[in-house]
Amino acid sequence: MHTSSDYRSMTLCERAREHLSAELDGYATPPGPEVARHLETCTACASWLRAAAAVTRSVRVAPADDVPDLTEPLLVAFRAATAGARTTAGRGLRWALVFVALAQLAIAVPSLVFGNDAGAPVHVAHELGSWDIALAVGFLYAAHRPVRAFGLLPLVGTLVGLLLMTSVLDLLGGRTATVAELPHALAVLGFVLLVGLARPRLTLRHRHA
């Protein structure tokens, strides 16, 4: 770093080039009138500035690396992932999922609004109703956007697996009746329909693996 005395002892060319170099690196303000007038009369400094600017640009702006064009593979993958939803069977799965969601809503709304769920405390009934409605909304969204069905599989699959396990344990322990567990069949059916909608993407992931 130069002191003020060192800077005054430098020639005008040296001061101009130091200032311009700092400006190219982003460390200085635009040149003052003295430097600007000097560049108009000093061809050596003007040439130096053009060369320095070219070097700076070549260092900062490097050519982009060659990458493969993935447009076609991505389009093929997208068409494969969404093909099932456009077939007759796919439309049938979507409508079936809509009916499951509506049935789920019909069962869940009383629990949420009235706090009544097979004798459960009101707070528990409210929480169960909220969860069942959220599940129904997820089913409706998957029916509307089948390509999103794949993302719901871990959540709904875990729910269905735990529901089946606890239902069997409660039935064997005499803590519930078969009729009381029948509404859980909606979640199981919804999961099966989700798997059907997500099958093209599951197949695609298997092929990639």
Image: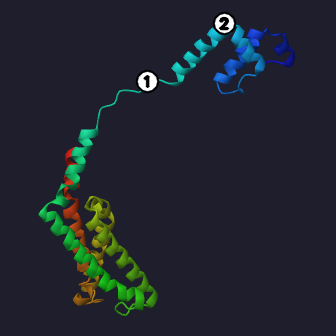
Residue 53, x across and y down, in percent = 59, 18
Query: Residue at point 19% right, 73% down?
Result: 96
Label 1 neighbour load within 10 Å: few <14, some 14-19, many 20+: few
| Towards the viewer: 164 or 102 | 102
Q: Looking at the picture, how far across and down is residue 45, in whole percent?
A: 67, 9
Q: Quadrant of the N terminus?
A: top right
Note whether 80 is above or below 24 in the view shown: below
Front: mark 1 or 2: 2
Which of the 4 image quarters holds residue 145? bottom left
Res. 209 visible in picture: no
Asked which secondary structure carries label 2, the reply is helix
> Which three-letter amino acid code belongs to the residue tagged 2?
Thr
Bin the neighbour count of mark 2 within 10 Å (Cα to Cα): few under 14, some 14-19, many 20 and up.
few
Which circle marks residue 91 in the picture? none
Location of residue 43 by image quarter: top right
Q: Nearer the viewer, residue 32 or 120?
A: 32
Give the residue pinned by disc 1: 63
Q: CA distance from mark 1 to mark 2?
A: 31 Å
Q: How is the image coloured?
A: rainbow
| Foreground pick, 201 / 85 | 85
Question: Which circle's residue, 1 or 2, is located before the other in the chain?
Answer: 2
What residue is at 30 percent from the left and 85 percent from the top?
106
Which quadrant does the C terminus fall into? top left
Give the residue furthest to the bottom.
119
What residue lies at 23% left-to-right and 79% top-to-bottom? 185
Q: Which residue is mark 2?
A: 43
Residue 99, horizontal then vertical, whole percent? 23, 77
Q: Amino acid at mark 1?
A: Pro
Look at the numbered disc 1 and give the secondary structure of its residue. loop
- Evaluate whether residue 103 shows in this view: yes
